[in-house]
Image: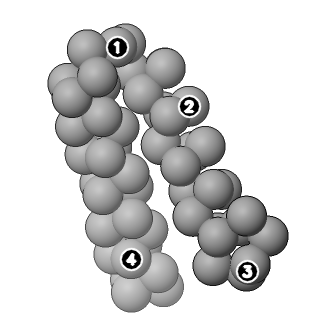
């Protein structure tokens, strides 16, 4: 159980940093930055599967 919470905390921290970095890079609000990050993740997954 402790390991699960540790991994969850790590993943949430990385996601938060990714959104904050994207917001700063593109000079947008955090909500828009989260959308940018999510669209990029989907596009990367599609490329990896040969759909794009």
**Which numbered tag is attached to residue 49?**
3
Q: Are marks 3 and 2 in contact (CB under 8 Å)?
A: no
Residues packed near mark 1 inside 10 Å, few (<14), some (14 to 19) or many (20 plus): some
Of labels 3 and 1, earlier in sequence is: 1
Measure the alpha-carbon separation of dots 4 and 2.
23 Å
Q: Are marks 1 and 2 in contact (CB under 8 Å)?
A: no
Q: Provide the residue designation for mark 4.
A: 7
Quarter-of-image position of residue 19? top left
**Which numbered tag is attached to residue 35?**
2
Helix, strand or loop at mark 4: helix
Of labels 3 and 4, earlier in sequence is: 4
Mark 3 or 4, closer to the camera: 3
Measure the alpha-carbon separation of dots 4 and 1.
29 Å
Measure the alpha-carbon separation of dots 3 and 2.
21 Å
Visible residue check, residue 45: yes
Mark 3 or 1, closer to the camera: 3
Of labels 4 and 1, earlier in sequence is: 4
Q: Provide the residue designation for mark 1.
A: 28
Mark 4 or 1, closer to the camera: 1
Residues packed near mark 4 inside 10 Å, few (<14), some (14 to 19) or many (20 plus): few
Helix, strand or loop at mark 3: loop
């Amino acid at each position: 159980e402790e390991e699960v919470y540790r991994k969850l905390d790590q993943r949430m921290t990385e996601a938060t940093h990714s959104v904050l970095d994207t917001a700063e890079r593109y000079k947008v609000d955090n909500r828009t930055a989260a959308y940018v990050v999510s669209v990029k993740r989907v596009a990367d997954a599609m490329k990896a599967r040969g759909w794009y």
